[in-house]
Image: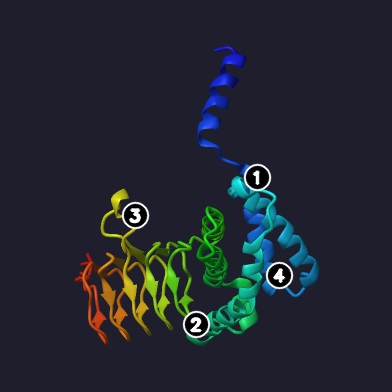
Amino acid sequence: MRREELIDIINKEKREIYISATLKRESQYFTELLFNTFFDSETDTEKALIELAAVFLKIRDLACPEIKGKPCKTWDDFTEAIPDLFCRLKKDAIAILKNDPAAQSVNEVYLAYPGFYAIAVYRMAREFYNLGLPLIPRLMTEFAHQKTGIDIHPGATIGESFFIDHGTGVVIGETTVIKDHVKIYQGVTLGALSVKKEYKNTKRHPTIEENVTIYANATILGGKTTIGKNSIIGGNSWLTNSIPGNSIVNNTSKVEIIAKKHD
């Protein structure tokens, strides 16, 4: 195939799908700078906020070309939410410190805990999601997913003092509702029973009430599934039905140890 013909074919396909690598790259930079503005003592807050406003305007114009160049009300709305956002993130960090015996300080949580990073990016992205900004919230949480292995959709509703320990492989779907003081461990999936496009505007993911603990590799599916408050879900459990409050769910398996015969 001639090079000119190949170029024409590729350009035609690109015009039909339109993907901007710049938008993805700048969204990742924006996410990292936003996190550092909140938690890195070496990041100059005033300078960072000025840069964040400029970068946000750039990615907003890329994501929403129909409003390119117009005043950025979305950024102003986000900055109004920052004090409350700080308060919620501090509660998350304290919850991790209180619940993880390996955590020595809040500073360690900020610096070394992938669960906190994923929660922080989710809460930032959630503010933009609530303001109706398309695509960028997903790019933000997907960047956190790449860095931590924790996949939280920005559409999920998550209460205060949320704790993710270890975190690798955690999946929290778009319509999940998680109340206050919930703890989850690595490999937990809060997902949908069925993935069909016609279910787009329905509640597909479970509701987790207050003070629930969900241990490693548990799977909870379905928009009608509710885990009652103060319940404990054991590791490797599989749930597609609701359970009442104060329940304990165990996935038991028989372990048989057979001693080797000595010759």
Quarter assignment of residue 256? bottom left
Query: Is any part of residue 248 visible from this angle?
Result: yes
Residue 196 in view (yes/no): no
**Label 1, label 2: how far apart the Cα atoms are:** 39 Å
Q: Which mark is residue 22?
A: 1
Label annotation for residue 37: 4
Q: Are marks 3 and 1 in contact (CB under 8 Å)?
A: no
Circle 3 sits on which residue?
Answer: 200
Q: The C terminus appears in which quarter of the rendering?
A: bottom left
Q: Which residue is mark 2?
A: 100
Q: Quadrant of residue 187?
A: bottom left
Image quarter where the N terminus lies is: top right
At label 3, counting other C-alpha atoms closer than 10 Å, the crowd grade (few under 14, some 14-19, many 20 or more) is few
State which tag comes first along the sequence, 4 or 2: 4
Q: Position of residue 173 (x, y in %)?
A: 39, 62
Query: Of the residues under marks 1 and 4, which one precedes in the sequence?
Result: 1
Mark 1: few/some/many CA within 10 Å (<14, 14-19, 20+): few
Residue 194: image x %, image y %?
26, 55
Residue 102 is situated, as x and y percent measured from the top left of the image, at 53, 81
